[in-house]
Amino acid sequence: MKTALSKCPVCDGELTVTRLHCETCDTSIEGRFANGAFAGLTPEQLDFIETFVRCEGKITRMEDEMALSYPTIRNRLQEVIRAFGYEPGKEEASDISDEKRRSVLEDLDSGKISAEEAMRFLNGEE
């Protein structure tokens, strides 16, 4: 069985599912149905997601199974995240408190620390 298309092969417009059919009992249902978030993914991205789930999200296991490097796996994961309409890393919360951030920026402004030191503090490296 082939995967449903999500884009029109003629004009590249969004396709809408209008008919569902059961092979077992020969029932058909017509209407307008959402394609879902996975409909716009490429076959390669779907394979990647299947492997990701099978490996329980453990990138080290994916490296072994797919024979790819960590950076390649991360890049593919970020491509899938973008295909879902999100920007990778945007949801990451900062581990540094607002008070500590202000203190670091004040120290930078007064010349007590360098820009490199400030970046290390703000990135939680010190």
Image: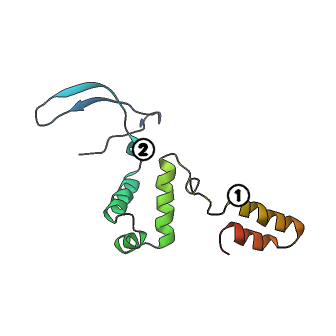
Q: Quadrant of the image for the C terminus?
A: bottom right
Foreground pick, 19 / 118: 118
The colour mode here is rainbow
Q: Quadrant of residue 113?
A: bottom right
| On screen, residue 73 above or below 80 | below
Spot occupied by residue 65 in the image (x, y as percentages of width and height):
34, 71
Q: Secondary structure at mark 1?
A: helix
Q: At x 38% / y 43%, what residue is drawn?
A: 39
Q: For this rendering, which residue is in front, 44 or 97?
A: 97
10 Å neighbourhood of mark 2: few (<14), some, or many (≥20)?
Answer: some
Q: Which mark is residue 89?
A: none
Residue named by callout 2: 40
Horizontal arrangement in the rendering, residue 2 relative to residue 113 (left or right): left
Left or right, 97 with respect to 45, comes to right
Residue furthest to the top: 31
In the image, residue 35 sits, relative to residue 93, either above or below, namely: above
Q: Earlier in the sequence, mark 1 or mark 2?
A: 2
Quadrant of residue 15 in the image? top left
Q: Is residue 85 above or below residue 109?
A: above
Q: Give the residue at mark 1.
A: 98
Residue at 50% in and 56% down: 79
Instruction: Say what amino acid the circle numbered 1 marks.
Output: Asp
Q: Nearer the viewer, residue 32 or 88?
A: 88
Q: Residue at x 43, y 72 (%)?
A: 68
